[in-house]
């Protein structure tokens, strides 16, 4: 009998299920995209039933093609797009409104009014976060204020709130478990990251009844048993983390000062700060990296809203390319100093700017500008935004010298070389780039007793390729100055 760990990696544009062998290798995988909905400018929604359907189908598919009759799944882990908000009926499990996605900006005006009341410092002290539409609390409040009957039902205890991990756990356990982990709780604006509890003052500030909220667990814990899912019936969910924290764990960044950057729909640079929740003076976020046996480990994080989504836009919106793999040869044939800057502020700007009202723009167009320059500018925009985060961390006194990277974009060697050049740092790509999924597999495996220590996991990390900076500092500074000038012109 062969044993596996199943990871559910529920992302912003697709759901995946991956079966891992116990030595951390991918055995079988299945992925399905689902529709994105944009009902108004700056609004982004998902149908929770699309998410649930694609999770079920990918799990069924991967079990059918990857798990033999005598094989066993010893544990399940869930990684999820963070902050995305769902409210559902406790009796029926039906959502009362579409999932409001982390990218959504509809509560920007209300967030601005709270900041004008000088409430942000107190919120930041408790949560490590800024008051921004990105996080869950203002999304919950919007649903309660704008969907008829929801506030009354919430106050009566008839509804449940969850980020996607909680929603999936509820469905997987047949409505028996309403739980989340500390990493996801730390992204709601309602969780005190210092005492590791939901905070009544924050609940009062945002007008949210505590009865809506899930129980907060460690990232490796017994979250509950799966019911009614075929051969997964009776298997326990034992690992759970927000996707970026899961990637940090999958990259085995367990030591203070280690950093990873994930290039998916957005880009997220996270640096382990150990048992100290450092406060950023440059608008980075303080967050829970993971929590094991009741002890939180913290991180500084810079969040970029648009990374791979910019390439998706070049493909689907402008139709300049048919597939993302076309971008690498186009960039290889383009000088890095071509003069075009694409600022992909499609849903505002994240760290360190935190401008929800900014919108995308392209600067530097000339009569000679063509597809290859615009595509290359799209790739470079992701690297420039990472440089923004590196600069902010540097000002806070911590500069990641080596960066472990993952996500769909890191298959592009040109991007990673330009990233190393613009950062002036070494960039390491792991042999296993499915770091989000393997991160929750590791968490589930720890809880299941498959892995004994973090050192066991560190020994499993392998480097595929390192990229060293070869660009001169003068050219690096000139290119980055051009980026800053473009951002300032928005």
Image (tube, rainbow, N blue to C red):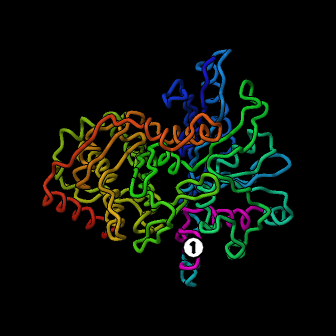
Q: Is residue 327 left or right of residue 150?
A: left
- Tell me the residue at 66%/41% (across/down): 238
In which image quadrant can residue 389 be found?
bottom left
In the rendered view, would you say 384 is above or below 25? below
- The residue tagged 1 is 111
Q: Secondary structure at mark 1?
A: helix
In the rendered view, would you say 103 is above or below 77? below
* Foreground pick, 484 / 2: 2
Q: Is residue 248 magenta-colored?
A: no
Q: Position of residue 18 (x, y in %)?
A: 56, 31
Which residue in the rendered view is the most extreme toward the top?
Answer: 69
Which quadrant holds the N terminus?
Answer: top right
In which image quadrant can residue 461 be found?
top left
- Tell me the residue at 55%/71% (across/down): 131
Q: Is residue 385 left or right of residue 226?
A: left
* Foreground pick, 331 / 461: 461
Is residue 411 visible to the viewer in this orientation of the structure? yes
Magenta residue span: 121-148
Q: Magenta stretch: dominant SS?
A: helix
* Foreground pick, 477 / 12: 477
Q: Is residue 444 left or right of residue 208?
A: left
Q: Position of residue 465 (x, y in %)?
A: 29, 36
């Amino acid at each position: 009998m062969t044993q596996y760990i199943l990871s559910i990696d529920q992302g912003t544009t697709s759901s995946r299920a991956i079966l891992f062998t116990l030595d951390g290798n991918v055995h079988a995988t299945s992925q399905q995209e689902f529709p994105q909905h944009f009902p108004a400018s700056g609004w982004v929604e998902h149908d929770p039933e699309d998410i649930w359907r694609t999770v079920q189908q990918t799990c069924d598919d991967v079990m059918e093609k990857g798990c033999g009759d005598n094989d066993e799944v010893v544990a399940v882990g869930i990684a999820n797009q963070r902050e995305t908000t769902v409210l559902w009926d406790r009796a029926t499990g039906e959502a009362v409104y579409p999932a409001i996605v982390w990218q959504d900006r509809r509560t920007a005006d209300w967030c601005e009014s709270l900041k004008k009341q000088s409430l942000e410092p107190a919120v930041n002290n408790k949560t490590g976060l800024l008051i921004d539409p990105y996080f869950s609390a203002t999304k919950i409040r919007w649903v309660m204020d704008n969907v008829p009957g929801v506030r009354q039902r919430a106050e009566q205890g008839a509804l449940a709130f969850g980020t996607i991990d909680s929603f999936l756990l509820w469905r997987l356990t047949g409505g028996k478990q309403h739980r989340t982990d500390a990493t996801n709780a730390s992204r709601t604006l309602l969780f005190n990251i210092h005492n590791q509890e939901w905070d009544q003052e924050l609940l009062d500030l945002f007008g949210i009844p505590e009865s809506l909220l899930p129980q907060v667990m460690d990232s490796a814990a017994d979250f509950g048993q799966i019911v009614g899912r075929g051969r997964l019936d009776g298997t326990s969910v034992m690992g759970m983390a927000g996707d970026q924290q899961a990637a940090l764990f999958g990259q085995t960044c367990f030591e203070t000062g280690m950093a990873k950057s994930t290039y998916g729909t957005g880009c997220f640079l996270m640096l382990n700060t150990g048992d100290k929740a450092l406060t950023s003076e440059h608008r980075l976020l303080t967050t829970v990296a993971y929590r094991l046996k009741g002890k939180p480990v913290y991180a500084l994080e810079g969040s970029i809203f648009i990374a791979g989504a910019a390439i998706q836009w070049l493909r689907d919106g402008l139709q300049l390319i048919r597939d993302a793999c076309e971008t690498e040869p186009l960039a290889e044939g383009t000088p890095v100093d071509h003069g075009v800057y694409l600022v992909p502020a499609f849903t505002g700007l994240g760290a360190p700017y935190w401008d929800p009202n900014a919108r995308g723009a392209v600067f530097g167009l000339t009569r000679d500008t063509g597809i290859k320059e615009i595509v290359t500018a799209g790739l470079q925009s992701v690297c420039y935004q990472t440089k923004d985060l590196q600069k902010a961390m540097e000002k806070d006194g911590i500069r990641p010298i080596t960066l472990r990277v993952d996500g769909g974009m890191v298959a592009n060697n040109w991007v990673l070389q330009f990233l190393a050049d613009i950062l002036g740092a070494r960039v390491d790509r792991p042999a296993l780039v499915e770091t989000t999924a393997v991160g929750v597999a590791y968490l589930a495996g720890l809880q299941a007793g498959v892995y004994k220590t973090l050192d066991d996991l560190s020994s499993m990390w392998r480097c595929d390729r390192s990229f060293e900076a070869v660009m001169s500092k003068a050219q690096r500074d000139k290119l980055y100055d051009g980026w800053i000038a473009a951002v300032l012109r928005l």
